[in-house]
Amino acid sequence: MYSEEVLKKLYADMILVRLSEESLVEPILSGDVKCPVHLYSGQEAVAAGIGAVLNEKDSAFGTHRSHGHYLVKGGSVKEMIAEIHGKSTGCSKGRGGSMHLYAPDKGFLGAAPIVAGTISLAVGAGMASSIRKDGTVAVSFFGDGAVGEGVLYESLNLAALRKLPVIFVCENNLYSTHLHISEIRPNDEIYKIAEPFGITSFRVDGNDVLEVYEAAEKAVEQCRNNNGPVFIETLTYRMRGHVGPDDNIQGTHTDIRPAAEVEDWRQKDPIERLKKYLLENGVADVEELDLIEREIQQEINEAYVFTNDSQLPPKSELEKYVFSK
Amino acid sequence: MSSANRKLQYSLAINEAFHQMMESDESVFLIGQGVKSPWYVGKTADGLIKRFGAERVIDTPVSENGVTGAAVGAAIAGMRPVVMHPRMDFMLYAFDPIINQAANWHYMSGGTSSVPVVIWGVVNRGGEQAAQHSQAFHALFSHIPGLKVVMPATPYDAKGLMVAAIQDNNPVVFIDDRWLYGVEDEVPEELYSVPIGEGIIRKPGNDVTLVAVSYMAHIAHKAANSLEKEGIDVEMIDLRTVKPLDTEIIFNSVKKTGRLVIADGSWKTGGFAAEIIALVNENIFDHLKQPAVRVTLPDIPAPASADLEKSYYPDEGSIISAVKSLIKN
Ligand SMILES: Cc1ncc(C[n+]2csc(CCOP(=O)(O)OP(=O)(O)O)c2C)c(N)n1
Ligand SMILES: [Mg+2]
């Protein structure tokens, strides 16, 4: 059984991610937010389930769609919202925007939008861990689209060969921009790509946070015992556009997903599922869950106040941060 | 409407080049990530799949290295592929097939094998997209022996240079800019090509030579027209090709004006502007009345935040001040 503490953390983390994401819809549509934003709504169970087994010393790398990864790793909501608005108080000081989130003090070593570009970097963090023998684990988050890039296979081989403590987390949401997985792969069983390297691999329901959490627990234990990398394919779905709230109303027409399919997945909402579990098993009652939600909403509201009170970096600071001192 | 003055958008001019080349030559095919999606390629691929089928218009997995290598290999095997990268930034995964293989192939084989491939990369910047979604790498590719690099600024040249690139027996890096996609101008309906390696004088003048390519040529042309109204007579040259450079057109102009400004949409150090200055210094140094001036990006990655982004990209005003700085002295 799961501890009450874990269950509530999973719930709170998913709520934090969902409410943060949804809070961005208005600012994007109104033009307050101008940078490209890839919302994570619908996929929260993956970030939360994996995040729950990590500590601050463990590292993680993400992608263009990494608000959730950053937040569950302990990245500050305030600094994320400020970053997305280009403010100098943002987690990347306004230099990166939504696609470049960093919280190295929390082990979130970075997100960047070159597809598959951070997978080998996570292997590097695993290598650092194995050289230092510090027992930390490195997580690489990437999408089904990244499975097309050769660097993934090089990374799997290297991690397996060196028995590096790396968890490869593929979030298979069935689409990479305008293409369904059937158009980019001869089969849809992504988890099997790890098998030839002798890497333990799982395929889990990525909208079931408990299933993700269990796989993550096994993975992290294997890594900490120096038994080599683990690959987890999570089957999930994004409830928003590829970029922005809704590709079709925003005119990019990348969202070619059938309405019935979207609706089908709406029924599998990961937050609703955990909520049901918590209530049915008497872990929490409605009031308590509402309170969690209200407190998190309050935190997000404060993030907007912080953002509004913050300045854009001035032109005079254009040259700042090109080189480290 | 006569064919001569029909107007077309830049993106549709590229599209017309594909329609005509794929129609006239069965060895031509288009491959790249997003050819099915206007979000990636604007209107450049309109109607191609419908007309030529998914065998010759291939949308791909996110696999830049493999896909570019396949295009290079198909070219070696006798086809004339165009491989599209919706952003130049993504092309970096494909450096090996472009540089180690395609660029060197003809030479390494002692001329027994050639690589008629077009590697098409789009510069797609602005909109707070930050460092990995903004880069322009023409200087980098022009450094490589065996590669030709073209950068059209007008719809006419976009069509003509795409046709020339496809017809060329060497690997050609064709670079366009999303900021130009909506620009409309005259484009002949018939199939024609613009010779690779030939610049063009957009506006003749006697006071200052202003050289640019691609989007910066578009802006520089405007700047030259604005300066005209202030009585400053700029000769604006759109080089159109970054490699091989049309040195003759530059030298003839600088011999006349004695003053040189280069406007470039990429970084300063080791860049396109630096190369032109080096050539002028080597060959016609005595004709320069003053040191040449560069208008480029600063040596800084592209920032996201609005004000930083605004000051990062040179505009018409930056070019005008550069020209005036030479006139004042
Ligand atoms: C190297 C590279 N090629 C192409 C792109 C354009 N691109 C941005 S997101 C994306 C699809 C990613 O799909 P997936 O990995 O499944 O992630 P998802 O968007 O579904 O979260 C692509 C191809 C890119 N950012 N980087
Ligand atoms: Mg995906």
Image: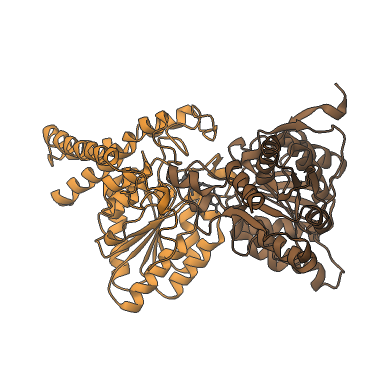
Chain colours: A orange, B brown
Residue A307 horizontal side relative to residue A325, left or right: left
Compare residues B210 and B159 and report the one nearer the observer.
B210
Number of numbered discs present?
Answer: 0
| Residue at image point 64% right, 58% down | B66
Residue B215 placed where, x, y %?
A: 66, 44
Residue A179 placed where, x, y %?
A: 56, 41
Report the residue that reaches farthest toward the front: B329
Q: Is residue A264 above or below residue B289?
A: above
Residue A149 placed where, x, y %?
A: 55, 57
> Does any portion of residue B33 appear in the rendered image?
no
| Residue at image point 80% right, 66% down | B283
Quadrant where the C terminus of chain A is found in the figure = bottom left
Compare residues A274 and A121 and report the one nearer the observer.
A121
> Does any portion of residue A37 appear in the rendered image?
yes
| Residue at image point 35% right, 45% down | A87
Residue B252 placed where, x, y %?
A: 83, 55
Residue B317 horizontal side relative to residue A63, left or right: right
Residue A268 horizontal side relative to residue A10, left or right: right
**Residue A220 is drawn in which quadrant?**
bottom left
Compare residues B117 and A52 and report the one nearer the observer.
B117
